[in-house]
Image (cartoon, rainbow, N blue to C red):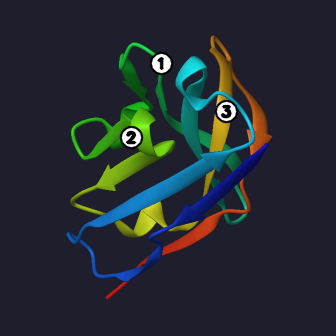
Amino acid sequence: VQLVESGGGLVQPGGSLRLSCNASGFAFRDYAMGWARRIPLKGIEWVSGIYTDGTDYYTNSVKGRFTISRDNAKNTVFLQMNNLKPEDTALYYCATLLGLAPPRFGSWGQGTQVIVSS
């Protein structure tokens, strides 16, 4: 299993970024996928998940601002992040999603850094 994230960077508050995660080594279309983030001094926080049927879920702090999607033909999952806030600054990870109650992850990528600052 290999998950490779990209798309992070430095953005001003109110800006947007689109994260991508390219997957290989497993049957991507058969797996739920998710995004989590590591916030300095706060630990890991689940952000969003998407099931194989496209049903999506979000943690409350990003609802209405973030959108998760997947392209099974390209083995890729995306996280569109709009109206970014400084508190969104984190290392964002893509992972296979084993469940949501509570959020449980399987394989992880290496992460992509997002910094929201003016």
How dense is the environment of label 3, judged by Cα within 10 Å: few (below 14), some, or many (20 and up)?
many
Determine whether, in the image, residue 48 is placed left or right of residue 68: right
Does the CB distance between marks 1 and 2 fall below 8 Å?
no
Residue at (44%, 70%) from the top-left corner?
7
Residue at (45%, 62%) from the top-left corner?
87
Q: Secondary structure at mark 3?
A: strand
Residue at (53%, 25%) from the top-left corner?
29
Q: Is residue 23 above or below residue 26?
A: below
Determine whether, in the image, residue 19 is placed left or right of residue 29: left
Residue 118: image location, x then y, percent: 31, 88
Q: How many marks?
A: 3
Q: Is residue 58 above or below residue 21?
A: above
Report which residue position mark 3 lands on: 96
Report which residue position mark 1 lands on: 51
Mark 1 against mark 2, which lies toward the viewer?
1
Report which residue position mark 2 lands on: 61
Label disc, if present, on residue 103 of the rendered structure: none
Residue 107: image location, x then y, percent: 78, 39
Q: CA gap, disc 3 to disc 1?
A: 10 Å
Does the CB distance between marks 2 and 3 fall below 8 Å?
no
